[in-house]
Image (cartoon, helix red, strand yellow):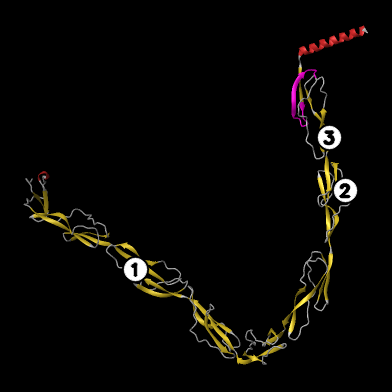
Amino acid sequence: MKKIIKIVSIMVGLLFILINMSSCTKETVTITFKNYDGTVIDSYSINKGSNAVYDNTVLPSRNSTQEYSYVFIGWDRSLKNIKEDTIFNPVFNNVKRTYTIKFVNYDGTILQQTVQEFGEDTVYYGDTPIREATGETSYSFLGWDMSLSSVAENTTYTAVYYSNVKMYLIQFLNYNGDIYESINYKYGDTPVYGAAIPSKTSTVMYNYRFVGWDPQITAVTGEAVYTAVFEEVIRKYSITFNSYIGGTTYLVEYGVLPVYTGPTPTRSSTQDFTYTFAGWDKEIVIVTTNATYNALFTQSPRFYTIIFLNYNGALLQSSQVQYGVLPSYNGVLPQKESTVQEDFHFNGWDKQIVKVYSNTSYTAQYIASPRSYSIYFRNYDNTLLAEYLFQYGSIPSYSGVSPSKPSNAEFSFVWNGWNPSLTAVTGEATYTAKYSEVIREYTIIFIIDSFIVQSSSLPYGDTPIYNGTTPSKEGTPDGYYEFIGWSPEIEIVTNNAVYTAVFEFIDTPEVPLGRNKGINTLNLTSALVYKEQIYFINKKEAL
């Protein structure tokens, strides 16, 4: 025994040494607790080899489905002697869910209540539901307010009933006790009479009008008899007033004198006669029975309306003409407005005028002819040159003397057509002669000593220019002529003109010289040729 105790003591000592050695090392591992969906709900570290402890106050949970709820029952592995990092996942127990199923009566009274698991069949095991009858209604159970289905949620089924209303015999009688109608009606319904309208035989003076029932009809509470009630009505008789083609009937009370209030009776005219109402075929008397009065008519020759219309339907003449008489038109000559293109001339009526046999209309007819317009040709000063008539659409032409326009100082005028240009005729038109302007030329003459030395034609407005050498005039022994201009003075051209050279005579002494002798021009101021001799003027010395 001592040996055993010694061995045990040695083993306890060894164990103690091992525990101390483990504590001195202090190696740790990570412990993680997760929920069913993988979310971490707790995590911490422990010494390797230690036991894991879940001490979170919130236990793992899982949402219920319609069929199951879930109860946490532990972890998917042992919590003891954990030697490495470890994840613990929860383990749940699936528990079928239960629901409360109620069957209640129409007034909410519970007939049956059970707790059943999801998916079980719903069954009512109780007695057939009942509903107490009232004085006027009984009830029969029909079923439930919804079809019974397998359990899926808390459900209440309510009893449904068919109502049966009590029936009562209702009779409708005539005044003499004859039965018109006998029908069973539900309690509370209001009877409705549906047979023939009750009647009572008339006398000569009275008819009888049904006015209701005795007693007054009310909602059904038991059996009832209703008797027809009648009111006396003075009897009316049919009084007929016949026209030739029909009649009007009045209902007139017994003892009253009938009066015809309709339109005056008429009789259709024949082709040759009309008829006028002349009264009735017998005297009208007070009513004692049905009666008929027939209209009488007098006969008259018939007249017809004869109208004459213009082309556009405008009334030209309307007259009443007796049957068989030939009508005539006595109005003004019908006219139709011209169009731009045409004139119209009356050409009779659309049909031959014949003796009257009916209402007739005659419409004026016209012949169309091209319309002519006055075309005026005028000169520049509005003087009328010619007036012609041309048809619409034709091109007008001028056949008179060629138009002319007097020249003025600056221009002469040449006729070159019309303004506006000639175009197809569409109406009255005036054309005015137009002219081209041509600048006038005038004869300009230059005369020297009675001789024409230059003659030319220059346009109006130009300035004449003498193109020859400076004009000169033969002198005399007593002097010479010096050119001093033109007479008249040169102006711009406005008319024919003659310009004559003007000279001034210079009186000077003269020294004749030989024809072939030289002249010292340095000492001379001027010279004059006279009869083939040279004379010096204002000389100092002659050589």
| Left or right of 114 in this view: 491 | left
Q: Residue 240: horizontal and vertical position, in percent?
A: 69, 86
Q: Amino acid at mark 3?
A: Asn
Q: Which residues are magenta?
A: 33-50
Question: Quadrant location of the C terminus?
Answer: top left
Total marks in image: 3
| Left or right of 362 in this view: 55 | right
Cα gap from disc 3 to disc 1, whole angstroms: 126 Å
Mark in front: 2 vs 3: 2
Q: Amino acid at mark 1?
A: Tyr
Q: Are marks 1 and 2 in contact (CB under 8 Å)?
A: no
User: Residue lying farthest right?
Assistant: 1
Q: Residue 455: horizontal and vertical position, in percent?
A: 23, 60
Choose top left, top right, bottom left or bottom right for residue 399.
Answer: bottom left
Mark in front: 3 vs 1: 3
Find out whether residue 464 is within the magenta segment.
no
**Nearer the N terminus, badge 3 or badge 1?**
3
Q: Amino acid at mark 2?
A: Tyr
188 vs 161, nearest the viewer? 188
Mark in front: 1 vs 2: 2
Q: Is residue 197 visible?
A: no
Q: Please give the residue where the numbered disc 2 appears in the rendered image.
A: 124
248 vs 518, nearest the viewer? 248
| Left or right of 161 in this view: 261 | left
Numbered tag placed on residue 94 in the rendering:
3
Question: Quadrant location of the N terminus?
Answer: top right
Q: Please give the residue where the numbered disc 1 appears in the rendered image.
A: 380
- Disc 2 crowd rating (10 Å Cα; few below 14, some 14-19, many 20+) is some
504 vs 258, nearest the viewer? 258
Residue found at x 73% / y 85%: 205
Numbered tag placed on residue 409 in the rendering:
none
**Nearer the N terminus, badge 2 or badge 3?**
3
